Amino acid sequence: MTFDPLKDGKSRIELVSSMGTDLDVVNDARASFEKSSTELTDKDTKLINYLIKHHHTSPFRGVVFKFKVKAPLYVCRQWWKHTVASNHNDEQLGWNEKSFRYVAATDEEDFYIPQVFRQQSESNRQASGGKLPSDLNQQAIAIYERQCQASYATYRELLNLGVSREQARGVLIPSVYTSWVWTVSLQSVLHFVGLRSGEGAQSEIGAYAQAIAQLIAPIVPETIKAWQSSNSQF
Ligand SMILES: Cc1cc2nc3c(=O)[nH]c(=O)nc-3n(C[C@H](O)[C@H](O)[C@H](O)COP(=O)(O)OP(=O)(O)OC[C@H]3O[C@@H](n4cnc5c(N)ncnc54)[C@H](O)[C@@H]3O)c2cc1C
């Protein structure tokens, strides 16, 4: 299953593969007793609820997901701050990203251009508030598109002069799309979804977080249910 979180026909997130289910969570938890189940029972579901409620987190690290993501560079930049068990600084799990040193940006279609602009929030210096009135929204779209086109045109001009891709990419603006493969534990993915769906998170990354929750729900349904009902911050 693939989602287009930003609904522009360009953004994308898909679950490429996964290891483990709710059953692995309970079996990892029962490793301490040298016990394991072959089927998920009511008792196991209760155990999952117990583990979440009491922050016994390590059994949720034995379930792993691999996502392929295409998102604007500024969303990628926010995502990259989630370092633990989606690691890019040691050998644990992984992050592998498209390189604009190898691959040239293709055309101006490769930029995310919002169709609904939000006003600057007055109470939260980091956040946005209500929508811009529609006439101003149209103007904002036109200005934004113009800058994306200019960025791409400048980039092409530099490439055409023979400038290297690794230097020319410096003129691509942060709404340019990039893509990466994210391998992440269940604990870390819940932590990500919790933070990025929460109040104050930017709605663009929030849309990816919501899609992730939908993608993993069929694989770990009891964990998702228990996590959502506990309001637990993993
Ligand atoms: C709404 C919002 C606004 C944000 N604004 C900014 C911003 O303005 N600027 C900015 O730079 N970042 C910002 N961030 C990113 C934020 O500071 C976190 O880096 C990001 O959310 C990842 O969270 P995390 O560190 O908990 O996740 P992970 O890196 O996955 O870490 C998971 C958990 O491991 C523990 N942990 C991780 N590293 C360490 C460590 N070195 N020592 C001890 N414990 C550790 C912590 O308990 C942490 O919660 C923002 C995030 C959100 C959700």
Image: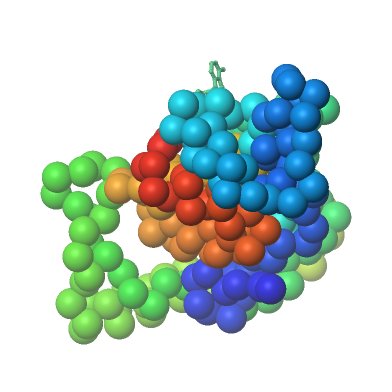
Image quadrant occupied by the N terminus = bottom right
Residue 78 % position (x, y): 51, 44
- Left or right for 49, reference 35: left
Is residue 168 shown above or below 176? Answer: above
- Left or right for 74, reference 58: left
Q: Residue at x 33, y 74 (%)?
A: 116
Is residue 61 shown above or below 22? Answer: above
Is residue 127 shown above or below 114? Answer: above
Q: Is residue 74 visible?
A: no
Residue 211 % position (x, y): 54, 64
Q: Nearer the viewer, residue 227 or 178?
A: 227
Residue that protrudes farthest toward the left in the picture: 122
Residue 166 % position (x, y): 77, 48
Residue 230, located in which quarter of the rendered image? Answer: top left
- Left or right for 38, reference 69: right
Q: Nearer the viewer, residue 25 or 64?
A: 25
Q: Residue at x 42, y 72 (%)?
A: 114
Q: Residue at x 55, y 26 (%)?
A: 56
- Left or right for 131, reference 5: left
Q: Is residue 56 visible?
A: yes
